Image (spheres, grey):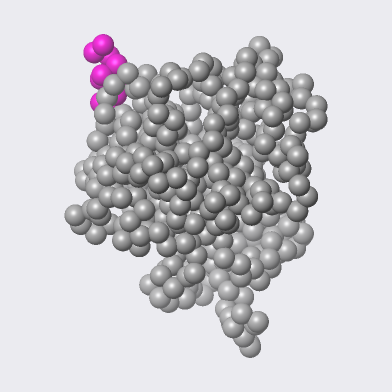
Amino acid sequence: MNAVDAVEHDGLDVERALARLRTNQKYHVGHTSWAESAVRAYVRARTAREAERRAAGRPATLPVRPQWVAVTQRETPDSRGATRYERTGWGRRYASADGSERELWLLSVNSVKEDRPPAEIAEAAAVAAAGVPSRSAFGDIHRPVTRDGVRPRRVRIVGVGCGTGEHDVLADWDTEEVERRFLDHAKPVLGRVVEDDRLNPGSGCVRCEGLAGCELPRRTPGILGVPGPRRPRGRRSVSATDLRVHARCAAQFHLTRVLHLKSGEPESEPIRRGRAVDEWLNIHHQEGCCRTTPLPDALPGLSAAELPAALAMLAEHQRACSLDGLPDGEVVRVQHRLTAYDPELDVVLIADPDLLYTRSGGWIWHETKTAAKRPWERQELMETYPQLAFAVLLMAAGVPGGDPRRSLIELEVLYEDGSRCEEIDPGDPDTQADARRIIAALAGPWAVDETYAPRPGDDCSGCDVLRYCAAGREYLEAR
């Protein structure tokens, strides 16, 4: 965004803007590499869409620097005590010279976001249509930068993927259509958001200014078993997957787990198969036991040749579905987010069990994995799957709660020709000691890392961000 600002608002050409970007030492080298390709991709997409406008006989649009802000001002406070609501739309803004048309470009990190709900698109269009060009200072409201009362007659919302340059028109409506869509789709959702006062701990706790005085998430000081960094750090979140990826390569962790970058290359069959199996199980576990559910004729993302292996794994699960025979009244949660907070490290811990359910007063934490072959039998289970060690520490600390004497961690590994189920007692002292050792060994380097240096090795050949890592490419070329 800073680089495109330099092009669109400061008059720099693309190469000079990127040269300025490269000299900024606060960015990771892989981040800068991605940003260079993303800026070029965005500028190409923008140029192509403007050419389309001209071909259609519509007026050209120019960059708009101020934020568009739609304000609702009340004479008296509402039930929440609020007298003012401000609605903004994050993205890049453009308008015709006469103000009759506006465009709001919604950016995605990788490819075009295909699953934006109608309410989100309608709200983006409503803000673009009704928003007043404004700026704000810290702690202040948005204040208009112009007295110009011109309102657009037409609004276009464009989605763009910065990693690929793909772009798509999500809405192209006159203001009457914008108002209708807003009333039908966005306004009901906004009402629910404003009225909802439930606590919803998760990764958003990282940015929450009220965390210190909030009763959730559960406080777990020292849970990772490592000292804090030498210098103050901003609050962070961490999961077992984060720690595992960081141990493999700190640069890959930063680019994929923090910045959420992807190469755009097709995923391997095992990854796609595992995702397809997980999604099918998640959908049907929402309804309870899946043992008698007919298997599908197809699974998303898998070809006809890849389907039999996935179906064989689903059949293996159905033979011993964990929810089979679960009494009525027990609680079942699918992919339910669990959180804890270590105030000493100022770290929010995140976990998403595949399946979480109660049984006789305790909680059962169930993880399902797919694998092509069985691991070496003597390999330590929690070493192989660190999320199990993570689960032990969280359950030992009282997350998600319940009777610890009746709580259990289950691991189900599905193969084409069989399955394996293991149980771990999170209350066992020896198991807890092993879990602390495993997590501390992973968390120690992560907690103090400030550079996220690449660790070139054989894993580079399958790395999702190899395109942005010069060290990894050099390693593979030298082999």
Residue at 61% x, 67% y: name it.
Answer: 198
Q: Main secondary structure of the magenta part?
A: helix
Quarter of the image holding residue 240? Answer: top left
Q: Is residue 104 left or right of residue 184?
A: left
87 or 244, which is in the foreground? 244
Residue at 69% x, 33% y: name it.
Answer: 321
Q: In this view, does 391 lie to the left or right of 121?
A: left
Residue at 68% x, 18% y: name it.
Answer: 312
Quarter of the image holding residue 261? Answer: top left
249 within the magenta span: no
For residue 147, above or below residue 466:
below
Give the percent coordinates (x, y) of residue 450: 24, 46
Residue at 54% x, 35% y: name it.
Answer: 423
328 or 227, which is in the foreground? 328
Give the percent coordinates (x, y) of residue 272: 57, 25
Q: Is residue 193 left or right of residue 93?
A: right
Q: Is residue 408 visible?
A: yes
**Residue furthest out toward the bottom:** 76
For residue 39, above or below residue 101:
above
For residue 413, above or below residue 430:
above
- What range of the chain is rendered magenta? 470-479
136 or 151, which is in the foreground? 136
Give the percent coordinates (x, y) of residue 32: 31, 39
471 within the magenta span: yes
Give the percent coordinates (x, y) of residue 76: 63, 88
